[in-house]
Image (cartoon, rainbow, N blue to C red):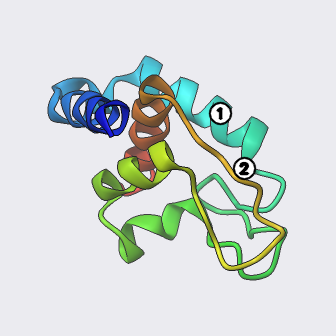
Amino acid sequence: MLQLLLRQTLIAAFLATPALADSKASLRGKAYAKANCSRCHAIDRRSKSSLEGAPPFRTLHKRYPVETLGEALAEGINTGHADMPAFELNPEQIHDLLSYLKTLER
């Protein structure tokens, strides 16, 4: 329980800083998305997701406030289908990925 509280506090601290739009963080987030997510999801502004039903990352902010995804990423993304691997990101990876997702909102 204490570990979860600490993790949530770290995530909140990262999200509260103006560094959310930091270009280095967003570049690391894009690299993470490319390495771990692009097999199924479109991670850019134009392409189509290769797996039907996998939402393009550029549309995630229309479904969820991007900032609220931090907790899910920390606890492990859990979906209703077996094709989605389990991911549990550390606070720095969460910050980077959310920074990248924020760039796709523009």
Q: Mark 1 vs mark 2: which is more N-terminal?
A: 1
Quadrant into which the C terminus falls = bottom left
Tell me residue 6's x, y (percent).
28, 29
1 and 2 marks in contact (CB < 8 Å)? yes
For the point 30% across and 57% down, which residue is it? 68
Tell me residue 42's x, y (percent).
70, 60
Q: Amino acid at mark 2?
A: Cys
Q: Which residue is mark 2?
A: 37
Q: Is residue 84 above or below residue 88?
A: below
For the point 38% across and 47% down, which residue is it? 70
Q: Amino acid at mark 1?
A: Tyr
Asked whether, in this view, residue 10 is left or right of residue 17, the answer is: right
- Judged from the image, the secondary structure of the residue bearing numbered disc 2 is loop
Tell me residue 23's x, y (percent).
41, 23
Outermost residue to the top: 24
Asked whether, in this view, residue 53 is left or right of residue 76, the answer is: right
Q: Nearer the viewer, residue 28 or 105?
A: 28
- Judged from the image, the secondary structure of the residue bearing numbered disc 1 is helix
- The answer to which image quadrant residue 10 occupies is top left
Quadrant into which the N terminus falls = top left
* Crowding near the residue tagged with mark 1, few <14, some 14–19, many ≥20 C-alpha atoms within 10 Å: some
Asked whether, in this view, residue 24 is left or right of residue 80, the answer is: left
In the picture, the disc for residue 32 is: 1
Tell me residue 98's x, y (percent).
41, 42
Q: Label 1 to label 2, Cα distance in Å?
A: 8 Å
Q: Is residue 75 above or below residue 28?
A: below
* Crowding near the residue tagged with mark 2, few <14, some 14–19, many ≥20 C-alpha atoms within 10 Å: some
